[in-house]
Amino acid sequence: MTTEMLDEAAKARALSDDVLDASGVTLRFGGLTSLDGVALRMVRGEILAVIGPNGAGKTSLFNSLTGSYVPQEGQITFRPRAGGEHELRGRKPHKTSRLGVARTFQNIRLFGALTVLENVKVAVETRQRTDAISIMLGLPNARRDERESDRKAHEVLSFVGLGHRLNELASALSYGEQRRLEIARALATTPEVLLLDEPAAGTNPTEKRDLEVLIRRINQELAVSVLLIEHDMRLVMSVADRVVVLNFGRKIAEGTPGAVQQDPAVIEAYLGASAEDERALVAEVVAEREEHGAEERPDGPPGAAGAAADDEEGRA
Amino acid sequence: MTAGVTAPKVPSAAKLRKRSWYQQPRWHRLFALVVTALVLAQVTGAQGTRGDLFAALEENFSGGAVWGWLGLAVAIWLVREFAHELLGRYTSRVKEEAGRPAERPGDLTPSGGFSPAAAPVWLPALLARTVRFVTDVVRGQRLYRWGSMAALLGLLIVLPLMVSTFWQQVMVDQIGMFVLVAIGLNVVVGWAGMLDLGFIAFFAIGAYSSAFWTGGLPVEPPVELNNFLVIPIAVLTCLVAGVLLGAPTLRLRGDYLAIVTLGFHEIVYLTAKNWTEFTGGSRGAPQLDRFSVDLGFWSYEWELDPRPYYWLQLAFVVVVLLLFVRLEHSRVGRAWTAIREDEVAAAATGVDTVRFKLLAFAIGASTSGIAGVIYASKLGFINPEMFVLLLSVLALSYVVFGGMGSIPGVLIGTAVLVWLPEYLRDTVDPQDRYMYLGGLLVVMMIYRPQGLLPSRRRQRELRMAEEGSGSADALGARPGGAQA
């Protein structure tokens, strides 16, 4: 890096402490544009929610940020606390994870044949460097790493409240517990940014309240910036510092939860026509969530129609 | 979301589950068994002649043999499908009785007293409880585990002294060799979940490295080495070959990967066969050195007696197992399982999938290097026909039969399946030996797909598949998550 570039980076940092800065992210699948020049700035330590109708490109955005998809255009800059800048576009998923960007999946993807503890240990151990030979010979560094991974996994699991189910199979957990285990697995990689893809989907009201508390604790106690995709408006409104609204792969609004709720563009995206009553918005979102996953969406808002929705579901 | 989605799905799922009698898996299994019986009756029976093509069919399907085979098939089916349930009801009573905790010898008396009418229940229960009580007491000793291992090892050490030379040869040339290969194949297939149909290629590479470095090939090596020194070189060569095979297959999974490994095997086989200047072509390497130790004051040479080779193999198997057992329950083993379960999630969690897959190929291939050197040096000659594709398929079937991913399973599976055709040599027409093996495999895969001694992780996968919350094909590899 030249000094000039360093200066520029320092200047940018001084303006705002962004942990993630994506600009002009464009992702196409053949003729279909899933993300169209999306810009996303995430301030360090905030909880940022991404909302939008089905097929708006939320999960595509997550996949682009974590390396599962490589957007054709755009820049995604990650600035860890330790300093430096990393371009995330086109970086391999496991390298992104090691930099400090962890994620969960919309459809739970645990290692079902491993126990709860082992699931988390897999994540802890990605930070370890013991080679196969030291492990086979049982050298002291291998034993130390194993103890360390045990300790860290226990710690993370009791943090999310699964400390009592360590030796249970991951597939034997309830849906809400599986969601929490996914979060634990992501946290075990000691991320600076945590991407949660619909963490409340399929959970009951009690679990949702627990989740809300958990997200806050992750944000405050662990100082992790949280990027959240969520359809549950109550959760988004109560937990998010800022909200970004996507529709048709474009960002149509950004701001505090209150401001976004009033935004005519957002209301139009959700309801298909302008309406003032914000309760109608919430009602629509709830109704939509219930239809989510059904093959046909009867009177879906125009924003979520057809191919785009199928695309996101199919590839997620 | 789920509540909304799954609620209407339950009745339709129930409808799907309600099938006509002939659609039940039980009848499918009977059909498979009967077909197997008919095939075996035909194949193990008389041969056809050029003059009368259907003579064999007539002969085999009219004699008593066909009824014998069919009877056996139906008997297996009846026992597995029905007697199982009846027995199950009885054994659950026994189990209940035997399951009461026993902390002192006095606690062993049956709960209902020693009433003679209930003797069929309490007698086996009492036996089971006594056995469990004793093993609990013994197991309480820390020595138990190591003691039983040592006893088993001791038995294996003296075993060749108790059997005929024929069986000694089988133990070295086949069981010992295949055990070493299968332990390595288990790493690739059982732990990392990559289907490898060409594993004997590594074994061939090990054997040819041995021939090369001991000066048995037409090409002179830089230095001629003792067989013991060749072992690390052969292991390294196999490691490199494993990585070379692994590299182009990293993006492939399941069936596609299997085809590539098949091709790899053919490449190695044909190279050995056709590159006459280097490998000696189909004639192979006819004269190879045997193992020898020369320490100046003491020297020993392995000669025709198979037993010293057996002990050498046993020593290597023990060392390899000690190393691999650690690996299975370490970060490496867990990472392999994670990749096998869900590669996308593993990568997103930070597991370097490329590195761990290559590691599995390399570590798996390494044991074949040892096996190859011992094999070549024991026989004193090698040629390409010793490394045909059939052996790769057999090695894979040993691993699957024993229980993928389970070390004790792989050891026992290999031993049983290698032993069986040799045992049958004297009892049936030697040409048909492998047909019986095939029949056994069919029955096994129908009724016990997890293998003889399945690993705990594999058992869980199969249970998940039965409950419908996941899928476990041959490899447990599936693109989606556990739930969606």
Image (spheres, rainbow, N blue to C red):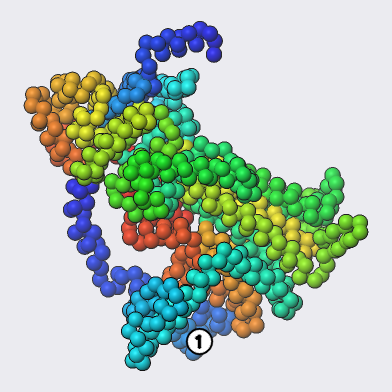
**Residue at (63% x, 78% y) in the render:** B423
Going by the picture, which residue comes out furthest to the bottom? Answer: B116
Judged from the image, the secondary structure of the residue bearing numbered disc 1 is helix
Q: Is residue B63 above or below residue A276?
A: below
Q: Is residue A126 above or below residue B283?
A: above
**Residue at (63% x, 46% y) in the render:** A139
Residue B384 at what x, y percent from top left? Answer: 71, 59
Quadrant of the rendered image containing residue A36: top left
The reply to whether residue A150 is in sight is yes
Side of A136 where A68 appears, left or right:
left
Residue B139 at what x, y percent from top left? Answer: 53, 68
Side of A98 where A61 appears, left or right:
left
Number of other residues with Cα within 10 Å of mark 1, as a class: few under 14, some 14 to 19, many 20 or more: some
Amino acid of disc 1: Ala
Residue A42 at what x, y percent from top left? Answer: 34, 22
Side of B231 where B327 appears, left or right:
left
**Residue at (13% x, 37% y) in the render:** A299
Residue B374 at what x, y percent from top left? Answer: 74, 60
Side of B308 where A259 appears, left or right:
left
Chain of the residue under label 1: B
Q: Which residue is mark 1?
A: B65
Image quadrant containing the C terminus of chain A: top left
Residue closer to the observer: A190 or A233: A190
Quadrant of the rendered image containing residue B432: bottom right
The reply to whether residue B402 is in sight is no
